[in-house]
Amino acid sequence: MTKKKSYKMQFSIGDQVVYPSHGVGQITSIEKMEINKLKVHCFKIVMEQDKLVVKIPFEKLEEVKLRKLSTKKDMQHALGLLKGKAKVRRIMWSRRAQEYNQKINSGDPMLIGEVVRDLYRKNNQPEQSFSERQMFQSAIERLARELAAVEKIDHFSATEKIEIILQSK
């Protein structure tokens, strides 16, 4: 029982949280569920952007790495990465894509920022493949969702802020 109480103190109904493999969501309720004849308490999290609802048992919060939103300072560090020079390793795209996917699904804004930085292309640079563009869009979307939640701005404004930073380098 003590575990349930510590999770209840860590997260509250109404909190915006990051579920690494899905992005930003909001805890809307605590529900009791029965799974394999075992009664568990779960957080119900609504991911507006994907029209997705997930229920996470208290006991699984660490396993799925649910976390609170980043601080403004952490987001500034992540945005600072965008100004750096792209680090593209000369390995096959399939291997790089796998690494980028892991970074995006980590939910860590610093790692997602690296993916955005590395996949960004200016108009005068060689065109990206379809899968590179998709990966870039996925990364920028994930970063913008958390930036919007942290700075309490809309998603469009957050995306615009990221694009302005990318274009200024």
Image (cartoon, rainbow, N blue to C red):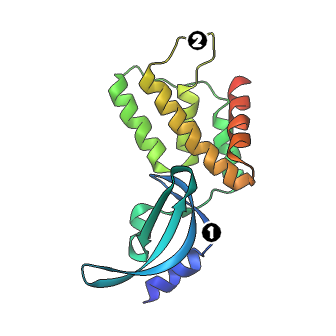
Q: Residue at x 62, y 68 (%)?
A: 15
Secondary structure state at the residue bearing disc 1: loop
Figure quadrant of residue 1: bottom left
Figure quadrant of residue 2: bottom left
70 and 151: which is toward the camera: 151
Viewer-nearest of discs 1 and 2: 1
Question: Looking at the picture, how far across and down is residue 158, in whole percent?
Answer: 70, 42
Question: Looking at the picture, how far across and down is residue 116, in whole percent?
Answer: 56, 33
Q: Residues within 10 Å of mark 2 (few under 14, many from 20)?
A: few
Q: Residue at x 63, y 36 (%)?
A: 81
The residue that mark 1 highlights is: 15
84 and 60: which is toward the camera: 60
Q: Amino acid type of disc 1? A: Asp
The reply to whether residue 169 is visible in this rendering is no
The residue that mark 2 highlights is: 125
38 and 147: which is toward the camera: 38
Residue 48 is left or right of residue 162, and the answer is: left
Q: Give the position of the C terminus as an image quadrant.
A: top right
